[in-house]
Amino acid sequence: MIGKIGIRTTGALAALWLGLATPVLAEVKPVVVELYTSQGCSSCPPADEYFHKQLARRDDVIALAFHVDYWDYIGWKDIHADPAYTERQHTYARAAGHRSVYTPQMIVNGKDHVVGTHPGKVEGLIKSHFKSSSAVDLSITRDGNQLRIKASTDTPAPMQVHVIRYKAAEKVSIKRGENAGRVLTYANIVSEWETVKDWNGRSDLSTNVRVKGDAPIVVLIQHENGGPIETAARIK
């Protein structure tokens, strides 16, 4: 029998179903924290550690580590880096009117930018986003290799639907570059990121996406061109 996993983010408590098991309470409107990091960045390990030991373990936060490639030239090529993740960070920078990007950087709900080595500021931003409401109602359900995404809103706007997969944790032995000789643990390493749908919100959204494997699945509904994330849901 193929089990079904579903999650819904609304103003009430959500339930996550696994097969015919008793419902388990899941996160309600989790806050998305994106970490932009690199294995070749000497300033990144403290942010990576905070991300791994604190943010990645929380159910009310969806923590996503995007490894960028612009430090690869220093002497160590980040094995998890992808030029697409670098471009995502540049998109955020353009939206915010910034001329450059840096690591370690954390972006909270696609809106607030903060240095990743300032956990107090990160925690403060997370708390502030818990108090905000979303204009989008989102639900996701997985049945075998099919991910079904449904969403609705009373406030139409140009938005995009992103599907992300990540690896929970991995230790990496750095051989060269600024972190040479260190063994570092990385968490919630983004391995796949795809924009699967453009949505204007004028009618309800219902779409299927083919998925495979056991890696966690995250769905983000985000305003286009590096805008705020309206809502997110996750299936672990």
Image (spheres, rainbow, N blue to C red):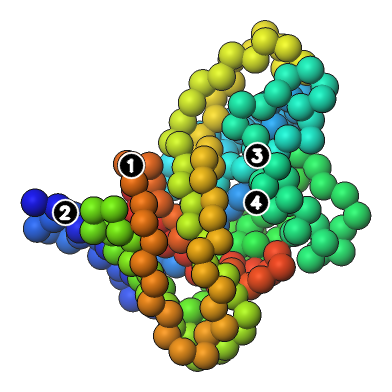
Please name which of the two marks, 3 or 4, marks the residue nearer to the observer.
Answer: 3
The residue drawn where x is 72% and y is 45% is 86
Disc 1 designates what residue?
213
Q: Amino acid at mark 1?
A: Gly
Task: Pinpoint residue 64: horizontal percent, then vertical percent.
Answer: 55, 46
Is disc 4 placed on a helix, strand or loop?
helix
Residue 150, can we see it?
Answer: yes
Left or right of residue 217: residue 88: right
**In this image, 13 relative to 105: left or right?**
left
* Sooner in the amino-acid sequence: mark 2 or mark 3: 2
Q: Which residue position holds label 2?
A: 3
**Residue furthest to the right:** 99
Marks 3 and 1 sit apart, C-alpha to C-alpha, by 20 Å
Task: State which mark lies toward you, 4 or 1.
Answer: 1
Rendered location of residue 204, percent (x, y): 42, 85
Residue under the image location 58 percent in, 52 percent down: 33
Residue indicated by mark 3: 82
Residue type at the position of mark 2: Gly
Tell me the residue that label 4 is attached to: 122
Crowding near pointer 3: few (<14 within 10 Å), some, many (20+)? some
Residue kind at label 3, given as amino acid type: Asp
The spot of residue 82 in percent (x, y) is: 65, 39
Place residue 159 in its image quadrant.
bottom right
Residue 25: in sight, yes or no?
A: no
Name the foreground residue: 234 vs 47: 234
Asked if the residues shown at circle 2 and circle 1 are in contact, with their CB atoms under 8 angstroms apart, the answer is: no
Q: Nearer the viewer, residue 229 or 209?
A: 209
